[in-house]
Image (tube, rainbow, N blue to C red):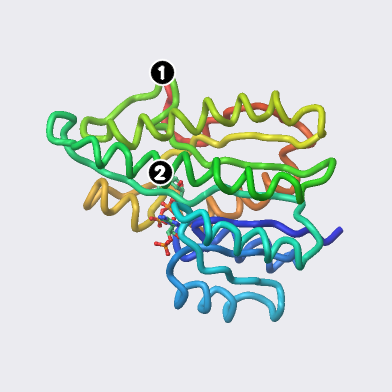
Amino acid sequence: MIKTIIVTGASRGIGYQTALKLSNQGHNVIATARTESNLQKLSADAPSGTITPVVADLTDPDEIQNIAEAAKHLNGIDGLINNAGLVHRESFMETGIDSFQRLMDVNVYGIVRLVQALKPLMTEGSHILNISSMSGYQGSLKFPGLSAYGAAKAAVIGLSEVLSAEFAEDKISVNCLAIGAVQTEMLSEAFPGFEAPVSPEQMGGYVADFILNGHQFYNGKVLPVALNDPS
Ligand SMILES: NC(=O)c1ccc[n+]([C@@H]2O[C@H](COP(=O)([O-])OP(=O)(O)OC[C@H]3O[C@@H](n4cnc5c(N)ncnc54)[C@H](OP(=O)(O)O)[C@@H]3O)[C@@H](O)[C@H]2O)c1
């Protein structure tokens, strides 16, 4: 069955590859991010007509509405992948409250705004998949300098669990993947020179499979997707 899936943060990295994988399987993908040129490249790389690009900043409520409008034109959505994210690495004592607020705004409130705008367009059997990080996963190895990022990604985990309880009566599933290192621009920014064991193509393939099938097996789950021991 052809599905309609929204992928945020689709202009590069994991989101780009997730959108491409879904479109190559014939699904309709609403691909959103701020960088229009990258979304155009995605459309060109994907099978004709499968990508609906929407340029939107997830911190702007008006631009969020443009994503909802695109979803209405496609008669609703079957899946939402909240993948867009922002990292910040600085010692805790140097990290200003503005950086904490910015990280929360993009990583957490972006999800809040989008889910509130899209929930009315979701029907029974829809799946919301939030992308968190091992940086926010309880008990995992932590790295100095990621306090704002880790706090925001932990908030994504808590939000996911509550939404799954709240949306259960509507039969909308909510899961969360706490992923480990993937070789993307974000990783290079946070850990210059570090080589991740997983490529964006690999993780995009996993995320694409999970949005299509994961809710047959999981609901309200926070799953670590990392090669290293999370404890
Ligand atoms: N790579 C890793 O090792 C790793 C590990 C754990 C978790 N993660 C998580 O995986 C997800 C994808 O990460 P990635 O490594 O693929 O990152 P990335 O290459 O830096 O891509 C981030 C994406 O988020 C979008 N974005 C950022 N701010 C936005 C905003 N205000 N509004 C709309 N879109 C925005 C960017 O698009 P524009 O700039 O075009 O808007 C871009 O498409 C993130 O949630 C990240 O936290 C990644």
Closest to the observer: 138 or 109?
109
Measured along the vertical axis of the image, is residue 67 above or below residue 112?
A: below
Give the alpha-carbon distance from disc 2 to disc 1, as whole Å.
25 Å
**Disc 1 residue type (three-letter):** Gly
**Left or right: where 180 falls relative to 176:** left
**Disc 2 residue type (three-letter):** Asp
**x, y (%) of residue 37?**
45, 78
Label 1 neighbour load within 10 Å: few <14, some 14-19, many 20+: few
Query: Does the closest atom of ligand 1 sit within 8 Å of the Cβ of label 2?
Result: yes
**x, y (%) of residue 148?**
30, 34
Q: Which residue sits at x=77%, y=28%? A: 168
What residue does disc 1 label? 139
Q: Which residue sits at x=32%, y=46%? A: 87
Quarter containing the C terminus = top left
Q: Which residue sits at x=60%, y=66%? A: 20
Circle 2 sits in a helix, a strand or a loop, which is it? helix
Measured along the vertical axis of the image, is residue 153 above or below residue 32?
A: above
Measured along the vertical axis of the image, is residue 199 above or below residue 171?
A: below
Q: Nearer the viewer, mark 2 or mark 1?
A: 2
Pointer 2 or 1: first along the chain: 2
Q: Which mark is residue 105?
A: 2
